[in-house]
Image (tube, helix red, strand yellow):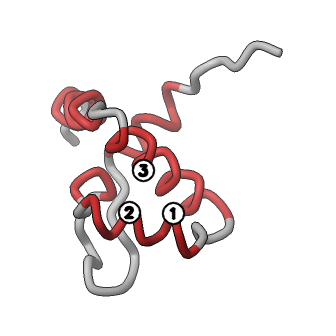
Amino acid sequence: MEIKPNPQFLVKLANTKMPYGKYKDRFLIDLPEYYVVWYNNKGFPKGQLGNMLQLVYELKLNGLEHLIRNIKKMNVK
């Protein structure tokens, strides 16, 4: 099975802020690593927010968060 990247999802991730909690209104990609690791251990929320946080976790784990930051810079609204 081939997995195809979804550019619209990455653009949305680059522009999505945390909707609640201690880090409310902070871009997901800018959340502290320990917080994203905590979610990974606790369980990500259901739905699109959970999918985005899970991707942020994988990006941070692999040192690739600069990719999302570059998308955010390119898509300044």
Q: Residue at x 49, y 25 (%)?
A: 7
Cα distance in 3D space between marks 3 and 1: 7 Å
Closer to the chain start, of discs 3 and 2, is 2
Q: Residue at x 57, y 26 (%)?
A: 6
Tell me the amino acid under the disc marked 2. Val
Q: Residue at x 45, y 42 (%)?
A: 58
- Answer whether labels 3 and 1 touch (C-beta < 8 Å): yes
Tell me the amino acid under the disc marked 1. Asn
Q: Tell me the residue that label 1 is attached to.
A: 40
* Picture quadrant where residue 50 is located: bottom right
Secondary element at tag 1: helix
Q: Tell me the residue that label 3 is attached to.
A: 57
Q: Position of residue 40 (x, y in %)?
A: 51, 63
Tell me the amino acid under the disc marked 3. Tyr
Closer to the chain start, of discs 3 and 1, is 1
* Picture quadrant where residue 31 is located: bottom left
- Answer whether labels 1 and 2 touch (C-beta < 8 Å): yes
Quadrant including the N terminus: top right
> Is residue 45 shown above or below 62?
below
How crowded is the residue under tag 1: few (<14 C-alpha within 10 Å), some, or many (20+)? some
- Answer whether labels 3 and 2 touch (C-beta < 8 Å): yes
Q: Tell me the residue that label 2 is attached to.
A: 36
Quadrant including the C terminus: top left
Judge left or right: residue 65 versus residue 49. left
Judge left or right: residue 2 versus residue 32. right
Q: Position of residue 72 (x, y in %)?
A: 24, 37
Cα distance in 3D space between marks 3 and 2: 6 Å
